[in-house]
Amino acid sequence: MGRSLQRITAAALGPYQSAVIRIGFTATYLLFLLREVPHRQELYGPDSPWSWELEHRLMSDNGAFTALMWSDSSVWFEAVYGLTLVSAFCTLIGWRTRTMSVLFMAGVLSIQNRNVFMGDGGDNVVHLMAIYLVLTRCAQVWSLDARRAGRDAARRSQGLGPARDVVGPVLWAVLGPVLLVAVVMGGLGETWWLPTLLGVVWVGAAAWWALRREPDGEPRVLLDVLANIVHNVTLVVIMAEVCLIYATAGWYKIQGSRWQDGTALYYPLKLDYFTPWPAASNLIAASSVMVMVVTYATVIVQVAFPFTLFNRRVKNVLLVLMIGEHAGIAVLLGLPFFSMAMISADAVFLPTVFLVWFGGRVGLGRDRLFARFARFARADRKGATRVPGPREPAGEGAGGPGGPGGEAPRHPGDGGHTLVG
């Protein structure tokens, strides 16, 4: 019991899994918002068939939160939509993750609650995970915050204090009055948990910044322990949520005849709305054996997955099958964002060894790409600054206007040189 308590309080478990969740869900919603930029006004803005007046009546009944109900102007809608895009990108790269995750959550709730009739099922998962991200320490790895924390640790090892932080206090000072005004004006809906969560995060951010120069002091250690407990509990909730999604989906499929006779898969493959690749859909639908295999495999995997968590090898095999299933849904049924959301949720069960290996391969590929660009830039710099020979007029030669290349000398500010800088 003592070891378990020490493990829960001493560190935030699953740093790579939580980072994958952060990257996966923010990338999913970021790409969704970018795709819908041409249609944003009709989906969630002033031009939506679900008008601002209708949404206001719905909000008065369910008490949900959406900042888009604060004003019906087009300028305010564009500001909320743009802020959601920015916060999603900042959370994706892990810059000021705690603050940006709060803004990302507010943006997701605002846009989705503005028109609850839009979505494909994956939006419900994004809705929940956006709330859970605020409670996790999801920027321990693969983030700009982790890089900044590493620099601060190096400074402390040299006997220096942490680097001066200006952005953090500015964000805290700006968002505090906004939160206060929203609470006083009743703009956070009729739920109790949202103002409580935002208030605790705001006060916690102030205490964390005030104690950052004493990382080994008792108050800072206490805050660290509390943050670890909240993170670990939230990670367990996320795992339970994923298991609940698959368990309920699988057991409901068993009860219906549509999945027993295969029509639940066959009919979507014949609908124009769900057939971006008609040839591939018709090929599968034409084979009764293929329809039967995919139908029963889907049901078996979803029902069995929660019970395989006690066996690591079987769990990993089913993870591969589920990820492949969602990839097939993205391609065959044209539901990429639903599949991205579910794959991101599945990633919480991926082995740490695999994630570390995958991160290392991505980092190695990135370093090789940057090295190639650097070599290209150095070679380009040498060619651009080559001194003419004694018999070669200035401005001519292999790279000059009169030379075989027929190109003017490159300016030092051209692309390759800018990359080196």
Image (cartoon, rainbow, N blue to C red):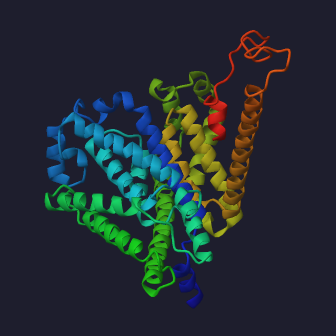
Q: In what quadrant of the picture does the C terminus appear?
A: top right
Q: Residue at the spot x=14%, y=61% of the render?
A: 184
- Residue lying farthest bottom? 2
Q: Decide: is 193 above or below 8.
A: above
Observer-nearest of 92 and 415: 415
Q: Give the vertical position of 1 relative to 196 (above or below).
A: below
Q: Residue 190 vs residue 207: left or right?
A: left
In this view of the protein, which residue sits in the foreground, 348 or 301?
Answer: 348
Q: Residue at left 45%, top 80%?
A: 220
Where residue 49 appears, x then y in whole percent?
A: 23, 30
- The image quarter containing residue 412 is top right
Point 53% across, 36% down: residue:
265
| Frontmost residue, 172 versus 47 | 172
Name the spot of residue 404 as percent of width and height, x first: 80, 11
Q: Foreground: 182 or 128? A: 182
Asked if residue 187 can be seen in this view, the reply is yes
Q: In screen coordinates, is 155 left or right of 106?
A: right
Q: Residue at x 46, y 67 (%)?
A: 237
Quadrant for the N terminus, please.
bottom right
Across and down, in percent, residue 295 comes to 58, 42
Q: Position of residue 103 (x, y in %)?
A: 35, 54
- Let me know if residue 295 appears in the view: no
Question: Is residue 199 toward the left or the right of residue 187 in the image?
Answer: right
